[in-house]
Structures are given as structure tokens and as C-alpha cells.
Amino acid sequence: ADRTSTEDKVLLRALRDFNLGKLVADDVNIFLGMIDDLFPKIREEVIRARELDFEAAIAEASKAANLQAEEMFVIKASQLREILAVRWSVFLIGPAGCGKSELIKTLSKAENVFGEKSTINVLNPKSVTRNELYGYIHPST
């Protein structure tokens, strides 16, 4: 927790850091433009909160899987971890071969290396009903 920042800087960091990882590349500049409109001239002052120890674990897990630990891959894995900390369900969307499966596997391995328990359960969404997949509210309960 950053107790020295002003309220507007804390809000800017929360909005930016928890939303950038959810956006497609085409929408990032639009979102940052909106942030600049809401918080003029302070976006550059507020740096992204990073967990450098965990990013090192991501790089280690990448190398163990014979992958290059490029900066953008490490950032995306870190963003996915942040999203999974506050969301129940996450969908990774992208074209074939863009690294979705490797990102999930690398993140899981990095969490295990970091001392956190992580497992991956793959589910074919066509094998279950929509209510089984997402849950539902029964009218009588």
C-alpha cells in the first residue's frame, strides 16, 4: 500500500493497472487517452506497481519451458496474475499461436516456483450446459 501518494494518484494507478491487462492492443491508446483526460499531466508521475521478485519467477519459468522471457510476455503474465487475484473467471482471447496457452502454463509454473500452489484445469465449454459452466440462481432459493 502506498501511503504517500495522493488520492488521485492512487485512483489513477488502480484504474490503469487493473484495466490495461484486459484490453486488446487497439483499445490501449483510447483508454490511456481517457485516463489523461480524467487525470491531466499526472499519468507519467505514477509508475506501474511491479512485483520484481515474481517477474523473476516468470522469467525462470519461461526459460525452463524453453521460451524467451521477453518484457511484454512477463508483463502480460504479471497482469494476468493481478486479474486472477480479483476475478473468478477469466477468458484469454486471441488468434491461434499468439501464446495464450504458454502464458497460462508459464504463469502457473511461476506461481509454483514462487511458493504458491497453482493448478490448471482445462474444460471444454461445449461439454457442459451454460448453467453448469457459469452457475445460476434458482428461483426458489
Image: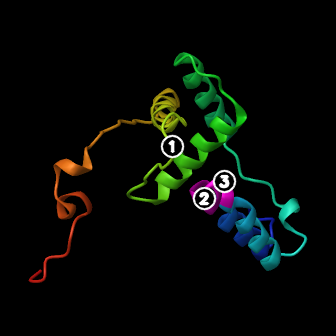
Pointer 1 or 3: first along the chain: 3
Point 69% across, 63% down: residue:
16
Mark-to-mark CA distance, 2 and 1: 15 Å
Mark-to-mark CA distance, 3 and 2: 6 Å
Query: In the rendered view, does 137 fall on the left or right side of 1?
Result: left
Q: Give coordinates of residue 121: x percent, y percent.
A: 30, 39
Q: Which mark is residue 23?
A: 2
In the rendered image, the quadrant that contains the N terminus is bottom right
Mark-to-mark CA distance, 1 and 3: 13 Å
Mostly what secondary structure, the magenta segment? helix
Is residue 70 shown to the viewer in this render?
yes
Q: Which residues are magenta?
A: 18-26
Q: Give coordinates of residue 114: x percent, y percent.
A: 53, 31
Point 51% across, 46% down: residue:
94
- For the residue carrying disc 1, how many other residues have a C-alpha within 10 Å: few (<14), some (14-19), or many (20+)? few
Query: In the rendered view, does 93 fall on the left or right side of 75?
Result: left
- For the residue carrying disc 3, how many other residues have a C-alpha within 10 Å: few (<14), some (14-19), or many (20+)? few
Q: Which mark is residue 95?
A: 1
Residues at marks 3 and 2 touching, judged by CB atoms closer than 8 Å: yes
Pointer 2 or 1: first along the chain: 2
- For the residue carrying disc 2, how many other residues have a C-alpha within 10 Å: few (<14), some (14-19), or many (20+)? few
* Image quadrant where residue 66 sits: top right
- Name the secondary structure under disc 1: loop
In the rendered image, the quadrant that contains the C terminus is bottom left
- Name the secondary structure under disc 3: helix
Residues at marks 1 and 3 touching, judged by CB atoms closer than 8 Å: no
Front position among marks 2 and 1:
1
Which amino acid lies under the numbered mark 1 shown in the image of this protein?
A: Pro
Of all residues, the one furthest to the bottom in this rendering is 140
Point 55% across, 24% down: residue:
61
Was residue 115 drawn as part of the magenta stretch in this picture?
Answer: no
* Image quadrant where residue 33 sits: bottom right
